[in-house]
Amino acid sequence: MDCLQILFALFVLSLVSIDAIRFHVKPNQRKCLREEIHKDVLVTGEYEVQETGQRTDLTVTDSKEHILYSKEDAKKGKFAFTTEEYDMFDICFDAKSVGGGQGPEREIFLNLKHGVEAKSYDELAKAEKLKPLEVELRRLEDLSKSIVDDFAYMRAREEEMRDTNESTHSRVMYFSIFSMCCLLGLATWQVLYLRRYFKAKKLIE
C-alpha cells in the first residue's frame, strides 16, 4: 500500500463516525451529549450504566424537544432511529438518588454510531444471502454514497455562505453610500445655515 492509499484510507476513516466514550455522572445531576447529524441517517447507540443501586434515566431528543428514545432506570441496552432532517440531537443521562441522598458517581459507557457504521451488514448478508465479497462491495458502495452526500452538503453550505456574504456586502455598501449622502447633506445644510446666520449678524457680506 503506497502513501496515497494510506492517506485515502485515513480520510475515509475520518468520515466514518463512531463515538465510544466513558464518563461519570454525579448523583442528582444531568449530563447531555450533543451530536449534529444529517438528514435520513441511521443512528444506533449502545449504552451501559454502572450498577450503584440508584436510578439513571436516558432520553434522546432533537432540537424541538421531540423524544426519540426514552428509558427509565436505564442499565444496559440499545436504541436506534433515523433522522428526518438535519438537526442537533441530545443524548441525556439523568442520575437520581434513591431517597434523595448522595451516592457514588456512576460510570456510563456509550457507543454511538451513525451512517454506514450503524448498518448491520451481517443481517443484510443473511437476509439477501450475500457472499462476503458482495457484503464488502455493498459497504463500500454505501460509504462512497455517504462521502458524496457529505461533499454535496458541504458544497451547498459553501454556496449558501457565499450568497449570505454577497448579500451582506451589498447591504453594507448601500448603507455606506446612504450614510455618506446623509453626511454630505448635513454638511451642506450646516454651511448654508451658518452663512445665513453670519449675514444676518452682518459679520460677512
Image: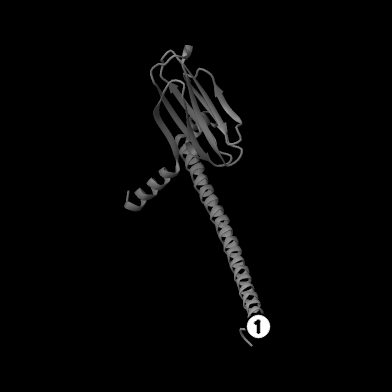
Q: Is residue 125 visible?
A: no
Q: 92 or 144, which lies in front?
A: 92
Seen in the picture, residue 188 relative to 65 is either above or below; the reply is below
Q: Residues within 10 Å of mark 1 (few under 14, many from 20)?
A: few
In the displayed structure, 152 sits above or below 190; it is: above
Q: Nearer the viewer, residue 132 or 82?
A: 82
In the image, residue 67 lies at what x, y percent?
A: 59, 28
Q: Nearer the viewer, residue 95 or 60?
A: 95
Q: Indicate the secondary structure of the residue bearing disc 1.
A: helix
Q: Name the side, left or right, on which 20 lies relative to 58.
A: left
Q: Say which residue appears at 58% left-offset and 64% top-offset.
A: 172
Instruction: Return the residue nearer the eye: 123 or 167.
Output: 167
Identify the residue under disc 1.
Answer: 199
Residue 203 position (above or below residue 19) = below
Where is residue 98? Give x, y as percent: 47, 13
Q: Position of residue 3 (x, y in %)?
A: 32, 52
Q: Quadrant of the C terminus?
A: bottom right
- The mark total stands at 1
Residue 48 versus residue 176 in the image, above or below: above
**Residue 32 visible from this viewpoint:** yes
Task: Determine whether, in the image, residue 22 is placed left or right of residue 84.
Answer: left
Q: Is residue 34 left or right of residue 82?
A: left
Q: Residue furthest front?
A: 201
Q: Amino acid at mark 1?
A: Lys
